Image: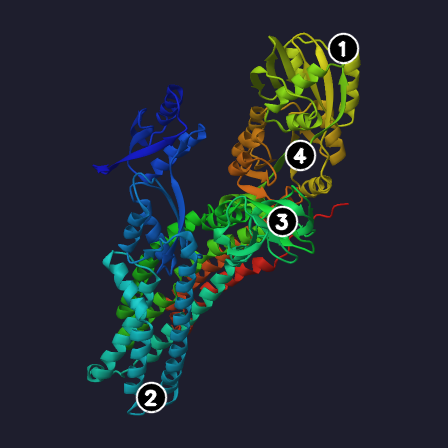
Amino acid sequence: METNNKKRIYLQLENVENEQAAVRIETHLSQLAEIETYTIERNTRRVVITVKNNEAVGKAIRSITQLGYKVLTIKKLFPVLGMNCAACANNIERILQHQTGVVHAAINFAASTVTVEYLPNMIEASQLQKAVQSIGFDLLLEQESQQKKTLESIHENNFKQLKIKTIWAITLSVPILTIQLFFMNQPWAMPIMWTLSTVVVLWLGRDFFINAWKQAQHRSANMDTLVALSTGIAYLFSMFNMFFADFWLQKGLETHVYFEAAAVIITFILFGKLLEEKAKSNTSSAIQKLMGLQPTNVRVLQKDGSEKQIAIEDVLINDVILVKPGEKIAVDGVVVSGNSYVDESMLSGEPIPVLKNENDTVFAGTINQKGSFQCKATKVGNETLLAHIIKTVQDAQGSKAPVQKLVDTVAGIFVPTVIIIALLTFSIWFFLGGDNSITQGLLAAITVLIIACPCALGLATPTAIMVGIGKGAEHGVLIKDAESLELAQKIDVVILDKTGTITEGKPHVTDMQWHTHDTTAQSILVSIEQMSEHPLAEAVVHHLKDYATVPISNFNSVTGKGAKAQYNNETYFVGNTKLLTENNISITPQLQQKAHEWEAKAKTVIWFSNSTHALAVLAISDTIKESSKAAIKEIQDSAIQVYMLTGDNKATADAIAQQTGITHYKAEMLPQHKADFVKELQQEGKIVAMVGDGINDSTALATADVSIAMGKGSDIAMDVAKMTIISSELTKIPQAIQLSKQTVATIKQNLFWAFIYNFMSIPIAAGILYPINGFLLNPMIAGATMALSSVSVVSNSLRLKWKKLHTVTVV
């Protein structure tokens, strides 16, 4: 709803259950200057805000989500049809951004897609399509499964048509050019050239004129406008000279036709677009490889023990699937029978096959080796890890790097600026060009129009981002957006969590000392730990699994310290030393000595007590990953500081740091302390990367400039982080940083070429060298140069695919 250029937006809230939550949201919204008015409707659980633009809507949503609440939005990727230049991309993005209910729209020119986040209660996908159609383009709205087939069919058909047009254009342009060079004095030369060029310009090149007219109807311009103007002027001027030659002869001037220029320009541009489309398809090869990992059919075991082959779309959760040697695994599941080695390199980037026994997890897209096994499906369709990776890579490839904002600004004014320069060029030639001023002015203006290339600018960043993110996925580094990929090469500090990041994240109880042996006390301990979500609690529960549980009450988790609960009106505590100290609980010298011994061996100490004294002390060990020490050294050798932050005690932190070569570390850190430390480093001007795997790391991950989650960690950590290391090996961090450097270097090379090309070529096309050495650029050469400029940018981005990433050697 819009009133007086102001938009009334309805934000549907989720998980807002009480008045306190509503007050917190109101407080935060009141701090946003962009919001004119706001009201929270408690009954309908929605916020009504009045804003002037959609950018304010995005800020309001981010403000609410930072409080831990959710706003109902849909984020969807749509293929765009008919988009063929950077100016087109800007126009589509602009029209979508102005639709009421759209939170954000980001177009990927290289992939011909647009990612739109919108409010489903205010706008539908069909309305987005109508908005795009109103400016001469279209969105593909079919279901995702059908969309891929339809899109492939459209692209295949378009490429086939483009190839046919290019071949015909070359076939017809060769005789036109031959006549121009050798037979112009023949009386039949002009009629034949006119006939052949008419086919090339007005039939094979008709799309340029159609699209230019559509843009003109909406007071817009793009690359098609430049091509249509330049070739159209050359064609019409040649027709005038052919039919009204006396006009020039009466003035004592010779008549010239430029049918060959118009035809050859169209031919070169068609050929360039053909090469560009071929090259652009290669930039998304990583996605195509990932999509090709999943088989189309699987063998499912029936209840009677027989096998039945069904389509992958028909597999249901809990179906038992038979996997034979050499086959691709179709879904995520758990092995229920048999064992085998499985190649997971396509997901994790790790080349060594992993042994899978009963109860082990297998993933869709991985390849079974020599053995056979049966697995029960736990995740199917869009819920599998492979589907998640494909979706993340697609979203990331559609995101924009910060440098793209400058490029978008330039691309938005590029075509109108070039048209103005062409008019100025003609005017200068008309007044200062002498006898052939009109002819020379038209040729120079045509050359300016045709040599300018907005596509090279538009392709410079997204093609490099697409290849870089795809390459990251192939090496087991899942990058969520272009910004983090661009920023990673500037990292000054890497902060590592200990458990699950430096260590395996599989803690187990190694020692246990009781003050007095009591079976009931052990049952109380395992009962309390069963209610805790901490990974160390799982280790205790597993160790004491043979003991019966007892009913406990008033369980309360104490963040960063442990937990407490009651049994038979007595309070019990499980946690670290700090928890016992704060509650004035005494510890016997014997138990204290044991704790010191274990801490010196890098073991984590857990205390169990009643309300007065310690009942037991347990030692939990978590093995350091084999690759951690080598990876940390590699990062340090790159002049990057490495910090370890852990909630564990100082003695354990000392031992871990000594074993891994870390010189900067902090112990007994609560989750908020980690986030505060990240802010401290940022205030010193550092670019900080946070690496973690647990829920307790999520605040620090959200605060860091670059956030990296371990793939085997918690879902919350992976949701918050901008990068995910699927294998959870720290050796991937140096590779991610190196990939960032390679990608940013490629973007800079592309942008330098795109800017310098246009900066130098346009003045030369206008005739700036003519007063110096008499040089005038031929429009046909300008057409070839423009066509190849885009191809060169895409080809340079493709070079990223062949650059190797350094592999950390684990000793």
Residue 664 found in image quarter: top right
Observer-nearest residue: 254 or 582?
Answer: 582
Label drawn at residue 184:
2
Among numbered discs 1 and 4, the one appearing first in the sequence = 4
Amino acid at dot 3:
Gln
The residue drawn where x is 65% and y is 35% is: 500
Which is in the foreground here, disc 3 or disc 2?
Answer: 3
Observer-nearest residue: 654 or 382?
Answer: 382
Return the x and y of residue 4 as percentages of the image width and height.
20, 37
Q: In this image, 649 relative to 37: left or right?
A: right
The residue drawn where x is 32% and y is 79% is: 197
Residue 254 visible in the picture: yes
Return the x and y of residue 574 as percentages of the image width and height.
65, 18
Observer-nearest residue: 650 or 767?
Answer: 650
Residue receiving disc 4:
505
Label drawn at residue 588:
1
Q: CA distance from mark 3 to mark 2?
A: 77 Å
Q: Residues within 10 Å of mark 1 (few under 14, many from 20)?
A: few
